[in-house]
Image (cartoon, helix red, strand yellow):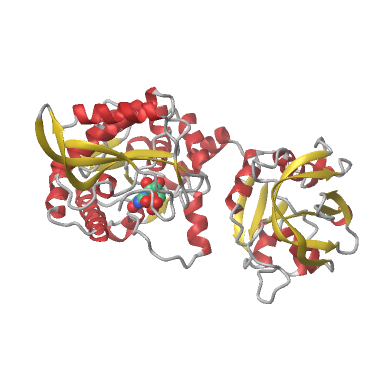
């Protein structure tokens, strides 16, 4: 399958993934590579176009990320954004300096609509700027095609060599006509035709899987989350009952979730696959008894999960392939190998391959972003409530119950969370909120109910808006909705006498409680 490809070269900009997504939204396949990627590798990929991202450095400083001049001499169109624009100018003989006036935010930009980059763009258009440095002199052969009141070179081009530099960020939605500009670049400058579509992705992937798997046996750890569900359905469409899905109910799922997953994937569901549900609730509760330290809890849940899965897999016997629901952001993050500190050890089925006997891993979603995985899910006919399911951590309610986990606490947080989600749905807020759930604080306090003293738990409600889950803001939920949730939880959930709303952003908080 030979697809048109545009590559994004990442200089550490915070919007690198956004750039790739915008290009894909134009139906052109796009991948991200580090600026350290060898030029030979880039040549081998035969990209139709190259986009250089922004980045936090000053390109004229020693040791700042850079790329050799050769990149601009390949005859492949290049679009530099912000840092990428400055770097292009510097490498090709222009000048970049500290800007006398720093621009940040929405700025009116005047563009030359005769440039193919600005075809059909309004001459005066709002763009998102975020820069301390500026291009004070363009490189030889370049002409200026956009300016602002404070920025003499908001964009420049050398049409002969198909090189384009933009100081602002077309990938950000605040740039009102940014999408059009990126569309112009990939279609009118790179000459792409737009051959990246979800329906053809599904068809082609099923074909490829069939070819690869042959008559082999395939095993999938199904969590009921979007990624593993979509991966499982793709495989089942491709190889039917050669696939076995193992679903471990660790007793830390949301209310009724185990049954919901079984209803879709089990024998009464829509798919012709072998489904094994392992009800291991008590095993997990036993292991977690008396353990309060968050990292220790995470490790216990992760290890026990592997043990249970391993046992189930042994019963199936030798398998040829193991499926993982790895998606593109996981690939990009691990590929660029950041040196970040471990805040929480994430538990994912990614840890499984060590312990199960198999020949090869299949990752059918490894080139997709989350929203693309959802589109594939819908394309495959997976129910919407599964496709748009809230993100849910591998250790489940284990990280939403502060301190020791017990079956009783799980029951409390499941019931409170179900009420909260129901009321959010009823208020029509489910599509606008990023992630929301109820957690159980380990705090008990005194209350009064029906003239009686109570000494019960406090439930915390959490709702955040977030783009990338790396940072998040507490969401503003209408007070009457919060009040309704509070009153229902106190009345309907035994063991709770206090409900609180968590206002903490991330950082300094995290989204989950542990
Ligand atoms: P935190 O709590 O780290 O959460 O701010 C960020 C996002 O990651 C999810 N999360 C996890 N996902 N395994 C996962 O697959 C985990 O162990 C895990 N811990 C947190 C969390 O729900 C949020 O969306």
487 to the left or right of 321: left
The image quadrant that residue 293 belongs to is bottom left
Q: How many marks?
A: 0
Question: Going by the picture, which residue comes out furthest to the top?
Answer: 426
Question: Going by the picture, which residue comes out furthest to the left?
Answer: 452
In front here: 288 or 195? Answer: 288
- Tell me if residue 458 can be seen: yes
Residue at x 32%, y 42% (from the top left corner): 222
The image quadrant that residue 138 belongs to is bottom right
* Above or below 195: residue 36: below
- Tell me if residue 266 can be seen: no
Residue 347 image offset from top left, x and y in percent: 32, 54
204 to the left or right of 136: left
Residue 28 image offset from top left, x and y in percent: 66, 42
In front here: 282 or 390? Answer: 390
Residue 27 image offset from top left, x and y in percent: 65, 38
343 to the left or right of 410: right
Residue at x 48%, y 60% (from the top left corner): 334
Which quadrant would the N terminus be assigned to in this image?
A: top right
In front here: 487 or 320? Answer: 487
In front here: 160 or 127? Answer: 127
* Above or below 273: residue 86: below
* Above or below 148: residue 203: above
Residue 156 image offset from top left, x and y in percent: 84, 54
* Above or below 159: residue 238: above
458 to the left or right of 106: left
Residue at x 42%, y 38% (from the top left corner): 230
Question: Going by the picture, which residue comes out furthest to the bottom?
Answer: 62
């Amino acid at each position: 399958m030979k697809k048109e490809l545009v590559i994004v070269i990442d200089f550490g900009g915070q919007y690198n993934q956004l750039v790739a997504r915008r290009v894909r939204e134009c139906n052109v396949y796009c991948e991200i590579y580090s600026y350290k990627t060898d030029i030979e590798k880039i040549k081998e990929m035969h990209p139709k176009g190259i986009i250089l991202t922004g980045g936090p450095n000053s390109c004229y400083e020693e040791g700042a990320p850079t790329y050799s001049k050769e990149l601009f001499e390949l005859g492949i169109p290049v679009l530099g954004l912000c840092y990428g624009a400055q770097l292009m100018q510097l490498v090709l003989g222009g000048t970049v300096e500290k800007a006398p006036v720093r621009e940040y935010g929405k700025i009116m930009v005047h563009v030359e609509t005769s440039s193919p980059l600005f075809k059909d763009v309004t001459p005066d258009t709002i763009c998102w700027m975020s820069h301390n440095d500026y291009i004070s002199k363009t490189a030889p052969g370049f002409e200026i095609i956009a300016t602002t009141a404070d920025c003499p070179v908001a964009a420049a081009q050398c049409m002969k060599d198909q090189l384009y530099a933009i100081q602002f960020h077309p990938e950000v939605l605040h740039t009102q006509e940014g999408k059009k500009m990126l569309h112009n670049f990939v279609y009118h400058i790179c000459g792409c035709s737009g051959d990246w579509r979800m329906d053809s992705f599904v068809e082609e992937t099923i074909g490829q899987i069939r070819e690869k798997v042959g008559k082999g046996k395939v095993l999938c750890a199904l969590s009921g989350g979007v990624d593993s569900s979509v991966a499982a359905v793709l495989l089942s469409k491709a190889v039917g009952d050669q696939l076995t899905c193992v679903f471990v109910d660790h007793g830390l799922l949301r209310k009724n979730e185990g049954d919901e997953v079984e209803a879709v994937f089990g024998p009464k569901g829509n798919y012709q696959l072998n489904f094994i549900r392992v009800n291991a609730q008590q095993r997990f509760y036993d292991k977690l008894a008396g353990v309060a330290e968050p990292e220790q809890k995470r490790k216990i849940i992760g290890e026990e999960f592997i043990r249970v899965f391993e046992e189930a897999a042994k019963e199936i016997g030798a398998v040829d392939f193991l499926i993982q629901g790895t998606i593109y952001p996981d690939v990009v993050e691990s590929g660029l190998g950041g040196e970040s500190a471990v805040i929480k050890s994430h538990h994912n089925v990614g840890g499984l391959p060590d312990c199960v006997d198999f020949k090869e891993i299949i990752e059918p979603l490894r080139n997709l972003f989350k929203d693309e995985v959802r589109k594939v899910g819908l394309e495959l006919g997976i129910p919407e409530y599964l496709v748009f399911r809230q993100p849910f951590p591998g250790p489940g309610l284990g990280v939403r119950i502060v301190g020791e986990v017990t079956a009783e606490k799980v029951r409390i947080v499941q019931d409170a969370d179900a009420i909260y989600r129901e009321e959010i749905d009823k208020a029509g807020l489910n599509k606008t909120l990023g992630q929301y759930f109820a957690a159980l604080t380990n705090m008990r306090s005194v209350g009064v109910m029906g003239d009686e003293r109570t000494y019960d738990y406090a439930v915390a409600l959490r709702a955040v808006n977030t783009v990338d889950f790396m940072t998040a803001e507490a969401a503003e939920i209408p007070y009457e909705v919060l009040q309704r949730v509070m009153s229902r939880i106190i009345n309907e959930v035994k063991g709770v006498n206090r409900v609180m709303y968590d206002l903490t952003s991330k950082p300094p908080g995290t989204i989950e409680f542990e």
